[in-house]
Amino acid sequence: MVTIKDVASDAGVAVGTVSKVLNGHYVSAENKRKVEESVERLGYQMNYYARGLKTQYTYTVAVIVPDILTPFFACLVYYIEKELYRYGYRTFLCQSMHDAEKDVYYLQLARQNKVDGILGITFNTTELSKAGDIPVVMIDRHLENSICVTSDNFNGGELAAGQLIDRGSRNLLFIRSGSLLSSETLKRGDGFAAACRERKIPCQVLDSGDDAGGYNVEGIYGYLREHMSGGKLEFDGIYTSTDGLGLAVLDQLRRLGIQVPQEVQLIGHDGMRQMNRGAYLLSSIAQPIEAMARAAVENVIHLIRKEPVEELTILPVKFVEGGTTRE
């Protein structure tokens, strides 16, 4: 079996250097490259059990997300796992499905498995607040005295309004879904409304969702149809709180015979792409998903090591073209 000494010998560095790389501590870029190449070449496998006995850590982090069907969550989990592995940590993935009982179950399981930390995107923050001495980092959500990583949602709403207005829209609609619990994502609508007020552009709001994360497609269709006259929709620009919701709205606009973007421009939020790599699914406010995952992992590692971290990390967003806005 390949040992850490074998890796050190192959890489031409000290055993302590190999240990630092495996534990995510700083070493020079050159030494890090040598160690990682030797680990790959020799097929070194870390003995987590022995490592845990020595350090009193399990080197496991629980990641709790609502689901892994939603492209945003799937992409986020991909980058979180990749970053945790880089630090020598394993990922314990939990899919809550917006179910409070599953949140309780997974929190208990996390305690039983003595995970070193928790990364959470959940609508049931009550349970995670009971994590006790397990370090918790939330993404977009807030717990009392918790650490939160998010993107600049307020500016995202401002960007969406500005793009719609600059491209000719003069009567705007914001459609949201999801929980109304304390969340950074609620600032998307706040930023959109603020930009509309500043530009003196009328803006309406439609709440189409529920706390379970879904949205009422027929309700959206009915609302849009009620706001049509002579085959024209009252609104000529729409911003949705997520890309998934944006695609649902796009379907209903087409169902009503409304051309996008010629008659109505549409901007979503998240920046989702085909297969998470191809073209953007619609014009959108793109979140820096990889950077968010990296910041969340760095924060939970710092907490595990009892190092100081910022209470709130806000990362920039940008507008991306996806064919549902005019040039």
Image (cartoon, helix red, strand yellow):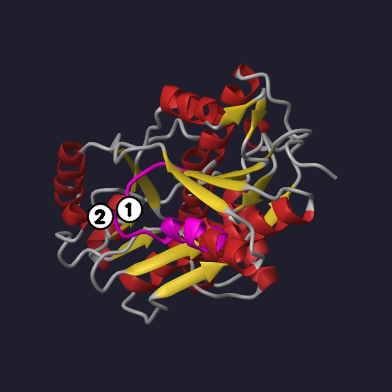
Q: Quadrant of the N terminus?
A: top left
Which residue is rendered at x = 78% and y = 49% of the image?
168
Among the two numbered marks 1 and 2 on one chain, the one whose residue lies closer to the N terminus: 1
Q: Secondary structure at mark 2?
A: loop
Q: Which residues are magenta?
A: 176-192
Left or right: 44 as drawn, with respect to 94: right
Q: Is residue 221 above or below residue 319?
A: above
Left or right: 165 as drawn, with respect to 303: right
Is residue 40 in view from this perspective? yes
Instruction: Looking at the picture, tell me which residue is in the foreground, 117 or 243.
Output: 243
Q: Amino acid at mark 1?
A: Thr
Image position, residue 271 (x, y; %):
63, 45
Which residue is rendered at x = 48% and y = 66% of the image?
24
Image position, residue 8 (x, y; %):
56, 63
Image position, residue 144 (x, y; %):
23, 70
The reply to whether dot 1 and dot 2 touch (C-beta < 8 Å) is: yes
Image position, residue 60 (x, y; %):
32, 53
Q: How many marks?
A: 2
Which residue is label 1 attached to?
60
Residue 189 among those drawn in magenta: yes
Q: Is residue 58 above or below residue 97?
A: below
What is the residue that sits farthest to the bottom in this orientation?
A: 308
Is residue 22 in view from this perspective? no
- Name the disc covering residue 263, or none: none
Q: Is residue 282 above or below residue 90?
A: above
Which residue is label 2 attached to?
115
Residue 252 among those drawn in magenta: no
- Place residue 94 in its image quadrant: top left
Q: Is residue 310 above or below residue 113?
A: below
Instruction: Looking at the picture, tell me which residue is in the foreground, 269 or 168.
Output: 168
Instruction: Looking at the picture, tell me which residue is in the foreground, 27 or 236.
Output: 236
What is the residue that sits farthest to the front in this orientation?
A: 230
